[in-house]
Amino acid sequence: MAGPQLHMSSRSPGPQRAPVALRWDDVALDGLAAVLPSGSRTTRELEGALGPLYRRLGLKPGWVETVTGIEARRIWGPGETFLTGAVEASQRAMDEAGIAASDVQALISCSVYKPRLEPSVACEIQGALGIGSHAFNFDVANACLGFLTGMQIAADMIQLGRIDTALVVSAEDASPVLGSTLAALTSPKADIHAFKGHLATLTLGSAAAAVVLTRASRARSTHRLVGGTVLSATEHHGLCVGDADGMQTDSVTLLREGVALAGRTRAAFDDVLGWEDGIDTAALHQVGRAHHESVLRQLRVPATQAPPVYPSLGNIGSCGVPVTAALARDEGRLRPGEHLGLMGIGSGLNCMMLGVVW
């Protein structure tokens, strides 16, 4: 099946206004959890399946690993699914926050992966957790930016007094799209254009993550979600287009425009929060080596302050930012009172950066 055609709008962006300033003074990040699948698939294994294509194109084994810096990615093992991962991450975050299922008043699922059009993934997770009928539940779709979008919606609901406690959760399953991509690239008709278009799909991995956001006065922790900003560059909506059969990506242009958007978002973020001491730790969405290093340069963040997870996990979609934050916490990188920056970029293009005072 032919992939979607990449296209760019000839229409210029409209008049520019000041970026949205997100500010909250009553929202705590009270629980944070990541779940990594037990299975693993190396990049060399994926490349091994592409032997005939590599020989036709004159590529040497190891090319994808060398270019992307991704050595492996996790896949759900026996008895595991993206749903069991989502439920486990949710339960861990709830346990950390010291809340029961009945305390959750909103459940927002933010996964890119969905096994079906309906019902919502949020319904399945809420049912599995035993959360009562009193709670809001819905899916948010915003590509790899989905998790931060879900956090923003939940924080607004808490700040407005609608709810006291929200659960935001994502789980990704890369296996189906990896399978369809390998099938496309092992076709005798596959050529260099197909390989370039599908390259980004070969970076994908699986994971699950969840956070509990609560009203600060009810929180067990002192971690405060204080604000941030969001920007878009939707004139580039055709640079990465995905469906169940795979992604078609203009990787070079996507990297350039995504990094530029990240830089503008960081500038707006600094204006909103005014953190004179800057960011102590950055949890970033990570696609691969080139993306990670380019974003760090654009954000003026030292590599020592932005832990990389892509070498062993790949691009884990909407789970990228929360998993990176959870692993940084587990490694002892986050200290009380320090500034944690959360930045996600999603195809579209959309970018959000949120600040947490740990």
Image (tube, rainbow, N blue to C red):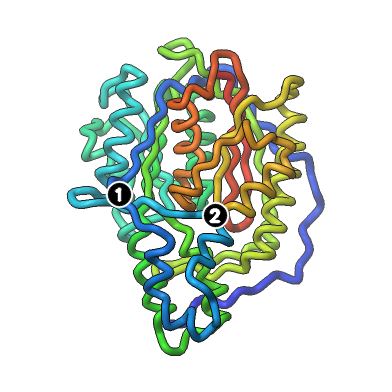
Q: Which residue is mark 1?
A: 82
**Can you tell which of label 1 and label 2 is closer to the viewer?**
2
- State the residue at coordinates (71%, 41%): 265
Q: Amino acid at mark 1?
A: Phe
In the image, taking residue 226 as reference, residue 129 lies left or right, namely left
155 is higher (above) or lower (below) than 348? above
Tell which residue pokes out farthest to the bottom in this image. Answer: 189
| Residues at circles 1 and 2 in contact by the CB criterion of under 8 Å | no
- Give the percent coordinates (x, y) of residue 33: 38, 31
Q: Quadrant of the N terminus?
A: bottom left
Tell which residue pokes out farthest to the top in this image. Answer: 217
Tell which residue pokes out farthest to the left in this image. Answer: 79
Q: Amino acid at mark 2?
A: Gly
In the image, taking residue 165 as reference, residue 156 lies left or right, namely right
- Give the percent coordinates (x, y) of residue 295: 68, 46
- Give the percent coordinates (x, y) of residue 179: 35, 69
- State the residue at coordinates (35%, 57%): 41
- State the residue at coordinates (52%, 79%): 194
Binning the other alpha carbons within 10 Å of mark 2 as few (below 14), some (14 to 19) or many (20 upward) gives some
Tell me, for residue 274, which label it has, or none. Answer: none
9 is higher (above) or lower (below) than 72? below
Residue 177: tell me if it is visible: no
Q: Which residue is mark 2?
A: 69
User: Looking at this view, is 101 or 58 the one in front?
Assistant: 58
Label 2: element kind:
loop
Binning the other alpha carbons within 10 Å of mark 1 as few (below 14), some (14 to 19) or many (20 upward) gives many
- What distance separates the C-alpha of mark 1 from that of mark 2? 25 Å
Residue 253: tell me if it is visible: yes
Q: Quadrant of the C terminus?
A: top right
User: Looking at this view, is 257 or 182 the one in front?
Assistant: 182
78 is higher (above) or lower (below) than 87? below
